[in-house]
Amino acid sequence: MKFVMDYIRKEEWSPYVAGILLGIVGVLAVLLSNSLLGASGAFESIAGMIGKAVAPQAFDNMYFNFIMPPGITWGVILLVGAFFGGTVGALSSGTFKWRLVSDDQWKKVFGPETWKRWVLAFLGAIVLEYGAGIAGGCTSGLAISGGMLLAPAAYLFMAGMFASGITTALIVYRKGY
Amino acid sequence: MANYLIAGVLGVFFGFSLNKAGLTKYHKIVGVFRFTDLAVLKFMLTALVVSMIGLYGLRSLGLIVFPSVPSTYIVGNIIGGLIFGIGMALTGY
């Protein structure tokens, strides 16, 4: 039992162990509420909800009426839970701390300014969410949740994601690749 | 209501597993695109294999019906993936 507790407290698990946990969560999501895990869809539901309240005309379209219904959906609650799950994870290993979303490796490439990280993260996240919107999901919602149902879409998405991800990393890390 | 409770609890484990796999860190996400740290790939594919076995097993036992499978539209999936990858490599999320 002590071994198990010690392992839970470790900052970084073997990705295989963490993967097994996520796999079980994925199965339980289907078994218990016939839903698929996902993250990007929740942001669209929230965006749709805000949009419908602020500018109902602009948001009265196919996408927000049928494809991504706005409101507090199952996925939104899941995302709130994931936020607390991540916090619990960091607390359990004692690595929880408030920080300005920076990273040593990022600083080496882009420089020490934190605001740059924020601007790039904001712009990059728009690109990311836009891509997820076109493809029909993100890494969790399409690649993992679709992949486990053997949906061809998931594997096409993964091929695209790695092709452009590797290319982008090549450009960003020109010398140090 | 019960459904929301399930979502919340599963969400906690979802976030917990992501945190423990290190996927909340920039250098982990970018590492997979630089081939310096393949944790993201190991994590994703392990989750895939486990849930595939679980889901197809439960379905053949007649215990579950698959939810609507994400739709395949080849060009959209690939282009979406290409755009997504740029964002992912830039932000590290």
Image: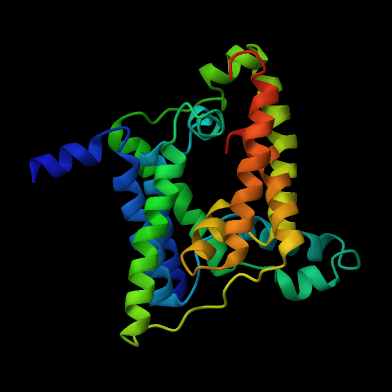
Residue A113 location in percent, x, y?
66, 14
Task: Give the number of marks.
Answer: 0
A104 relative to A11 in the view: left or right: right
Residue A105 location in percent, x, y?
54, 18
Q: Could you tell me which residue is drawn at 72 percent across and 72 percent down? A: A67
Q: Could you tell me which residue is drawn at 69 percent across and 31 percent down? A: A168
Residue A108 location in percent, x, y?
59, 12
- Asked where in the image residue B65 lies, by quadrant, the reply is bottom left
**Quarter of the C terminus of chain B within the rendering:** top right
Q: Can you name the residue that lies furthest to the right here? A: A57
- Residue A29 versus residue A82 in the image, above or below: below
Residue A129 location in percent, x, y?
70, 49
- Residue B56 versus residue A72 in the image, above or below: below
- Asked where in the image residue A118 lies, by quadrant, the reply is top right
Residue B12 in sight here: no
Q: Can you name the residue that lies furthest to the bottom here? A: B62
Residue A143 in sight here: yes
- Residue B93 versus residue A51 in the image, above or below: above
Q: Could you tell me which residue is drawn at 90 percent across and 64 percent down? A: A58
Nearest the eye: A141 or A161: A161
A76 relative to A85 in the view: left or right: right
Q: How is the model colour-coded?
A: rainbow
Nearest the eye: A101 or B37: B37
